[in-house]
Amino acid sequence: MSEIAVLSLMVSSLGIDAVLLANWLCSIQINVELEQEEEETLTRYDSEDIKQMRAKSVQSNGYSNPESPEPLVKEWEYKIVRASQDVFRNPTVFKRLCQEEAETGWILVEKLDDRRVRFKRLRRLETQENPYQIKQDPYRSTYGKSNNLGSWLTVLAFITAIILPAYLGFSLVAMSFNKSEQNSPTTLSSPEPEVPPTSRQN
């Protein structure tokens, strides 16, 4: 009876593990889609450079210049620096990142979260003859170690949680069948009754 209970527990745990794995994969997909949507939507800032361009677009007679400053704004190029962990939560690390990016002309736009930071710089800087003494790739998009050890460990834990109950359940079923075969009574063939010899009558 106890073996049946343990077997039922193993089978039910397989269903629970499958549901948890599906929810985990679904949550990862949702987070990736939200991050992509957030990165594609550039937050509009009334920064000092845009204010100056708007002030220059106003003529002395008080009428606005029909030429919009938007073409000048399009001269900016953007990039997002990503980290594999929440390292930008540390103010020292975040300040060091901004200083390193400033060496190649990048200006901080916004901090999306503790793993992603958006920068911008003028597009014409890429055509100039080494305006900075560049010590790093100006178009780097990762910061720090880009290993996904935590993700791999999580996947390994989920796979182990699914395979281990299945293996234990199979072993338990095999043991129960072997035990039932050993305990089953062996049926012995009963000997045929001896027929007494019939005496011949003369």
Image (cartoon, rainbow, N blue to C red):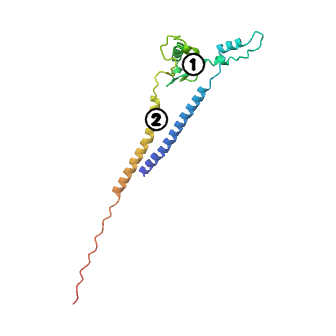
Is residue 23 among the parts visible in the rendering?
A: yes
Q: Nearer the viewer, residue 95 or 11?
A: 95
Q: Is residue 49 left or right of residue 104?
A: right
Q: Is residue 181 above or below residue 169?
A: below
Q: Residue at x 54, y 12 (%)?
A: 128
Q: Is residue 180 above or below residue 153?
A: below
Q: CA distance from mark 2 to mark 1?
A: 33 Å
Mark 2 in CB contact with mark 1 (< 8 angstroms): no
The residue located at (64%, 18%) in the rendering is: 73
> Residue 53: percent from the left, percent from the top?
68, 13
Q: Earlier in the sequence, mark 2 or mark 1?
A: 1
Identify the residue at horizontal 66%, vertical 15% (top origin): 50
Nearer the observer: mark 2 or 1; the answer is: 1
The residue under label 1 is 119
Q: Position of residue 98 (x, y in %)?
A: 54, 15
Question: Which residue is rendered at x = 60% and y = 18% of the image?
Answer: 76
x, y percentage for residue 188?
30, 65
The number of discs equals: 2
Q: Quadrant of the C terminus?
A: bottom left
Kindly state the secondary structure of the residue where label 1 is placed: strand
Q: Is residue 192 left or right of residue 34?
A: left
Above or below, comparing residue 170 to residue 32 in the picture:
below
Residue 175: image location, x then y, percent: 37, 50
Residue most extreme to the top:
60
Q: Secondary structure at mark 2?
A: helix
| Relative to 190, 148 lies left or right | right
Q: Which residue is mark 2?
A: 155
